Image (spheres, coloured by chain):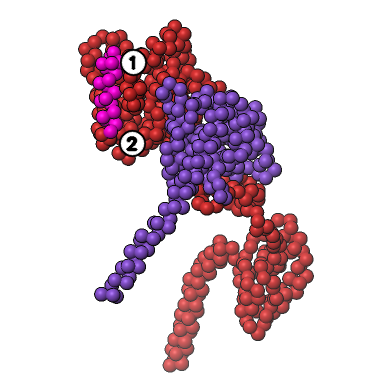
Amino acid sequence: MPDIARPLSRRLFMSLALPLALTPSLVFAATSAESYVAKVGNGVIAAARANSVSQFRSLLKSNADIAAIAIYSLGPYRKSLTNDVKAEYYSLVENYIARVFQQYAKKLAGQGLEVQGTKDAGDSVLVKSVLNMGGGGSVPVTWRLVKRGSSFRIFDVNVDGIWLASTQKTNFVSVLKKNNGQISALLDYLRK
Amino acid sequence: MFRTVSHRKNLHLRRMMTCACCAALLALLPAAASAERKSERAGMTQTVLSLVPNEESGKKKKKQVAAKKLESKQALKVGPKKQVSKTDPGQALKTDPKEPVFKTDPGETFTFDPDQQVLKINPKPKQYVFEIDPKQRVIVEPAATVSGVDVVDGVQVPGDLNETGGATGDPESVPGDLVDTQTDPLEGFNRVMFGFNDVVDRVILEPVARVYRAIVPPPIRRGVTNVVNNLATPVTLTNDILQGNPEAAANTIKRFMVNSTLGIGGIFDHATGLGEPLHREDFGQTLGTWGINGNPYIVLPLLGPSNPRDMVGRVADTAVNPMTWILYDAPFWERSIPIGVEIVSGREAILDDYDSLRKNSPDLYASVRDLYAQKRQAEIANEAAGYNPGSGASSLPPSTIPQTLNPY
């Protein structure tokens, strides 16, 4: 009897202790991601109300993983990016995204952002939220965050079912495809 | 007499032996010729075969080789000679261990010049050693791994370029796609159809939508949209049930009851104010929830972006829609009113977004295809807002003319 009871109790202990030990860290990760989104979301609403490209750019600089977004946006052409144009490309992408946000400022200028929950997507964390507009309307906004060090960075934003980075990738790949993968053509497109 | 007979027999035997020898020789000659031809075809000559240890010929050739060694190197520079054999150091020429003929370096090969009857030594090709900085990655794959991609061997790629993406824990990793890939094997046909639809839109649909916006005030336009949504209730309710979503079905019923009565036939959307927001479902979405993917992409004339799943869904929804049967025997123009109103109302709702897309997209076709795939995926996952222009924001998608034509 003691021979059976001992391993069972150990297993029982492990099965109870492991989730208990992991739960606080998971809860902490979820809450930190949610609080991060709440903070950034308010910044986005403020920038949208101000309709300011510079404010959007400042927000991107401090909260978005521009390098990852820029590389992702190249799709199958990412190997065309060489070190000599990397810095310029990142800067142009940052400006491009800031202009896209400014273009949709009217739609993002809501009353407030309500964070609804977090979902693990393997290589990233998805934080669901709702942007409350005036007059009872709302827009679902999902934030895709990547872990960078001890904090998070925004990788993509889904506004009402449309991922902005994915749409941006479609545009960049179209430009590169038309120009035989020449990264200089994409840089010219982004400079416009 | 006996001697004469035996002598004759001997002569006869000799003649027979001679004949037999001649016959044997004649029989062997074609075989030898054939073997020679075969050896020639295989890149070997009879002279080369004389490399088989032979003291005299070996010495003679050694001298010739020694005299011609420099010449052979020059000959190599001029043009490639037929390579006859590749030898390991000292092996091929050391068939007789007592007589090592040559000492060769690893990698050296021999070429026989039949004109000059000289064996030439081809020097070992130079080997280059590349030192690679382990901190940097170098592309070693062929240039044309991905068609149309500008990749050149040796181009250094920054360390943070992650080909596959999504490596958890790697601080420099690039996450992968969340959107399912939309295959487009009919791109040629689709682009033609897209161009046709674009002309129809520019000539008819867009101008009509602009006139509609100009002459109909926003509250009336909103009322029209609400009526259209209310009429779609049977389709949404059927698909709520087929998707096994009782909460959504309850929401649809409540909305229909409130808006049909308090909302005066659906003109006013009081249900949203009472906590029952709008959502729309169609049979294409239902098929999506059952695991049927949206490939391949198809652009239909006038109807726009679609796929086999959504085409089947459209037929099923038309069958479920009561308006189809109410107006079944009505004249064509009467039957066209509900769909016409829906098309113009939907096109007006996305006028600004589609203008922006047209202006900024480097490839409008590719952008519309991507947006359609994303939007449908979000609708299937119930992650997109209901079609509610009153919110002032949910008109970001569909962003396509064809989806405007798609009533759902």
- Residue B288's label in the rendered image is 2
Badge 1 density bin: few <14, some 14–19, many ≥20, Cα 10 Å: many
Q: Quadrant of residue B321?
A: top left
Q: CA distance from mark 1 to mark 2?
A: 31 Å
Look at chain A in the picture and name its colour: purple
Instruction: Read off the magenta span.
Output: B247-266
Query: Can residue A126 be spotted in the picture?
Result: yes
1 vs 2, front mark: 1
Position in image of residue B227 (x %, y %): 32, 16
Chain painted red: B
Q: State the SS at label 1.
A: loop
| Residue that label 1 marks | B268
Position in image of residue B78 (x %, y %): 74, 56
- The structure residue drawn at horizontal position 44% and vertical position 6%, both measured from the top left corner, is B215
The image quadrant where one finds the N terminus of chain B is bottom left
Depth check: give the residue in front, A154 or A21: A21
Main SS class of the magenta portion in the image: helix
Which chain is mark 1 on? B
| Amino acid carrying mark 1 in the image | Phe
Position in image of residue B388 (x %, y %): 39, 22
Which chain is mark 2 on? B
Position in image of residue B254 (x %, y %): 26, 25
From the viewer's perspective, is B105 left or right of B359?
right
